[in-house]
Amino acid sequence: MRFALLGNHRDGVQMADALVATGRHEIVAVTEAEMRGRWTTAQHIADLEEILADPAVDAVIVASKPTERAAVLRRALQSERHVLCVHPADQAPDTAYEAAMIEADTKKVLFPLLPDAHHPGVVRLHELLTQSVGPVGNLELLQIERSSSANVLLDAGLDGYKPSLPDWHVLRLLGGDAAEVSAFAREEEVDAAEPLLVAGRFENAALFEMTLLPNQPETRLRITALGDRGGAELFFPLGAPGPAFLSWRDAAGAHHEESWDIADPWPAVVAQFDRAIAGNAESSVATLSWQEEIRILELDDAVRRSVHRRRSSTLEYPAATEEAGFKGTMTLVGCGLIWVILLLLVLSVWVPWMGWLIGPALAFFLLLQMLRWVIPGPKR
């Protein structure tokens, strides 16, 4: 597969390196001049439209500046090519919703670049949490503490741009969907230079806590899982994706520890992208899809609302199905019909024949209700 790199974001460059390393993919164009010498097969083409008009380009990596990423993503999807996008796609989930609809129309793969949950230490911790008779048991509390000598938030320091939180993909992998989020900061907005505390509840009733500490003397990441049988801790003393140490105790009380040197998560991300292109339903532990990007952006948005309003944010995940859409439409039609009937009743005082329109209006609404039985539904 031949692909192009739009921008120079670190994650996009590393994904391009991993794709080229497989020998199955070839990079043919880059938009940034400093990238031209990195790959011998890549041409420097500054014009985005020229790249997207080239039929030789099968896929593009959107690695533009955060303030330009949403517009580039939209244009790349409209060109009907496979798209890989650096996270976050935008500072609000609306762009991700729109991208999902375009993906459904074009039938091309839309793939987020979220490498953190592919670290072997995170994958191993997930295995401990999902074992039927594991050392942790049923998860009760998940704690993530990240400190850095610089900024902790993603894309921080840009004027007018809201930074995003790290580690959401890891948290969702280990605990599942979040049902409620509460965030605490010193001011009424998320500030990259200030500590941030996030607490919440998963849909499975387990609790979680994230502590983000910028401008600390050292950089480290600690993930602790506590259950009804015991606990496990994954520690990155130099921050991810550096060396990692996983420790836990078994049912007999024996201490266990595993360790990894600096791990490269990108080959696992490439493998998932290859499966998505091939239409293979097989998936790994940290499954990647655009739905994951949507959920993470929704969590970012929930945190910002919680900090601003000083109260918890509840997350809901309605199923977007034809049946749900039909019910929603009929609810709106029914509410509108009530107002029409009231209006006709009032007008019938002066124009008596308008009262006779109430019956046909009700009959039309009942006819619409019969469509669910007349028109066959989708196969399950």
Image: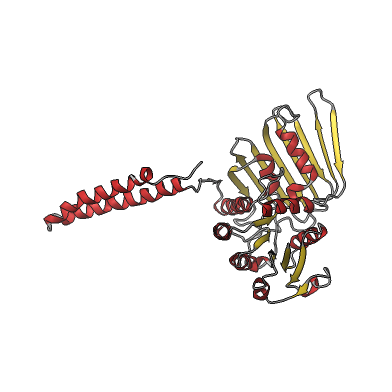
Tell me if residue 114 can be seen: no
Looking at this rendering, what residue extends furthest in the top direction? 252
Q: Quadrant of the N terminus?
A: bottom right
Q: Nearer the viewer, residue 189 or 34?
A: 34
Q: Position of residue 199 (x, y in %)?
A: 64, 43
Q: Position of residue 308 (x, y in %)?
A: 57, 54
Q: Position of residue 215 (x, y in %)?
A: 77, 56
Q: Is residue 127 above or below residue 1?
A: above
Residue at 68% over, 58% down: 87
- The quadrant in which residue 113 appears is bottom right
Residue at 70% over, 69% down: 56
Residue at 75% over, 47% down: 118
- The quadrant in which residue 343 appears is bottom left
Q: Position of residue 204 (x, y in %)?
A: 60, 35
Q: Is residue 238 left or right of residue 202?
A: right
Tell me if residue 130 can be seen: yes
**Image label count:** 0
